[in-house]
Amino acid sequence: MDIYQLRYFLAVVETRNFSRAAERVFVSQPTLSAGIKKLEQDLGVILFNRGNRDISLTDAGRRFLPRARTVIYECNTAKQEARGKQPSQRLQIGVPKALPITDFANLLSDFRKTHPEAQIAIKEGTPEQLQIWLDEKRIDMAISLPPESGSGHLFERLFSTKCVLAVPSGHPFTVRSSIPLRQLDRLDFIHRSHCLSETDITRTFAREGVNPHIVFRTDEDNKAISLVAAGVGLCVIPDMTTAPDIEQVPIDGLNISRTIGLSWLEENQNDMTEAFRPFAASHNWKDQRSSAGNLEWAH
């Protein structure tokens, strides 16, 4: 049994997909598959149930998982100690209020499975505040919009999201492929004041002469989604925001999208930021049925 086989194993566990796992440990899919097969042969057990769409652990795989994580953790710690370095444990992350919390929580949960020593602190703010906090070193990294030109912040794209209309399940709009923007005039709306695209949305509505009736203004997505689901009003949301009892409908004439990524200062890097960066980049942000992996295993 080799260390690289354990890294392959953990990558498949976290991604539930051989192709994504191969990308995250920087090898081809055939190489990863061969490594997993050799590991199973060495152990004398089958570790994964290989379905058409999803990969899951067998009972033997579940028993093997905690041991594999422990071995990789101890190897990483031993490498750092041999270099005379103590592992950096604290990671302060800034996030905008509009970031879907469930997806972010899944990312942090998976990260801590592999880095149980990590002490994570989360600070919520506007994109402008996040940039200031990075400069002041009050946070190590920020998940937000691309930084302003000349800020000196490094940036790595994580995902893109576009604006859609949230309506309650069963609403007449759900049977249509899209809704013309002007058809939203005078309809009851929930206004998300923390939306990263709020200014562009407001300007687009005004330019087209669309004046919705604002029933409620909030900076909390759970309140906005609950009111939409209850039929109190419609709402413009990013397409990665999902919830039971609501559906999404594209809006003709509202073509607004945003790129979200990870920002940091080069001088502010440490062991934890270096581990978290590829981990966040490899997270499948728009598909919560799968989990994130950790590229550090390949180092």
Image: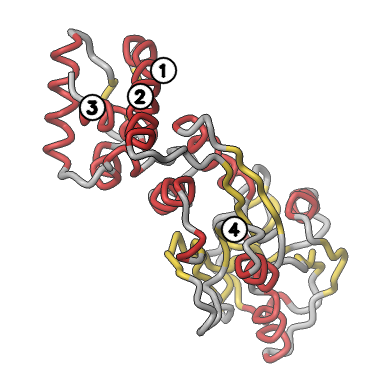
Residue at 51% across / 84% down in the picture? 150
Across and down, in percent, residue 226 comes to 77, 48
Any mark on residue 56, and which? 2
Circle 3 residues within 10 Å: few <14, some 14–19, many ≥20: some
Label 2 vs 3, first from the N-terminus: 3
Label 2 vs 1, first from the N-terminus: 2
Label 4 vs 1, first from the N-terminus: 1
- Label 2 secondary element: strand
How far apart are the two marked residues, 4 and 2, measured between alpha carbons?
30 Å
In the picture of the structure, the residue carrying the numbered disc 3 is 3
Kind of residue at badge 3: Ile
In the picture of the structure, the residue carrying the numbered disc 1 is 66
User: In this orientation, which residue lies closer to the viewer: 268 or 132?
Assistant: 268
Say if mark 2 contacts mark 3, CB within 8 Å.
no
Placement of the C terminus among the 4 image quadrants: top left
Residue 176 higher or lower than 287, as above or below: below
**Numbered disc in front, either 4 or 2:** 2
Residue at 65% across / 70% down in the picture? 127
In the picture of the structure, the residue carrying the numbered disc 4 is 248
Across and down, in percent, residue 277 comes to 43, 53
